Amino acid sequence: MTDLSRLVAEAASKSGLLWVEVPGDRAWPVWHVWVNNTAYVVSGPGEQPLPDLPDEVVLVLRSKDHEGRLLRVPAHTRRLSPEDADLDDEWGTATQALKASRLNAPPGDTVARWAHDNVVMALSPHGDALEEPGHYDDASGAAAPVPTPATT
């Protein structure tokens, strides 16, 4: 049996991209940072699109070697807020890591903009993998393209 916690940590820390499967919706590709066994993501105006997340989602982690699906794991979600900062200051830890990883940020105080206009989420994997090396679903995983107003 695979050491899931090590495999999740390795996959999440080696790739800045994962997919968040939202029940009743689709899988959303997101950039993230991996800190203390948690994936942190920021979404909203000026950032990546992501719908409101329920308490539970599925994370799809890719292999850095072959860029294909490596793991599907359930994850708890929590919305972070600077007002809810506890003694460990998870907001500060998450936003500083996200800011350091954010490419081409608009001018100004990025963290203050996130606090005011955006959503910062903590995605914490838990439990057994839904798919892992040697144990993959045989279904294709194909999904319909996302609707778009684009004409070409």
Image (cartoon, rainbow, N blue to C red):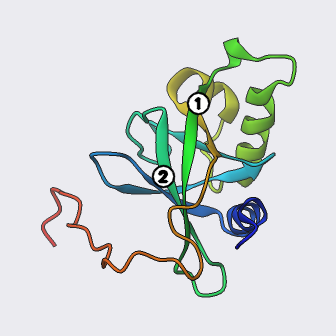
Q: Position of residue 91 (x, y in %)?
A: 73, 28
Q: Nearer the viewer, mark 2 or mark 1?
A: 2
| Residue in the image at 71% along x and 63% along y | 4
Relative to the observer, which residue lies in front, 109 or 72?
Answer: 72
Q: Residue furthest bottom?
A: 66
What is the tally of numbered marks visible in this picture? 2
| Residue in the image at 53% along x and 31% along y | 119
Reading the image, the residue beneath label 1 is 78
Q: Quadrant of the N terminus?
A: bottom right
Give the image quarter of residue 138: bottom left
Describe residue 76's horizontal placement relative to residue 26 as left or right: right
> Which amino acid is tagged 1?
Arg
Describe residue 34's horizontal placement relative to residue 131 as left or right: right
Residue at disc 1, secondary structure:
strand
Q: Position of residue 139 (x, y in %)?
A: 31, 77
Reading the image, the residue beneath label 2 is 58
Relative to the observer, which residue lies in front, 72 or 33?
Answer: 72
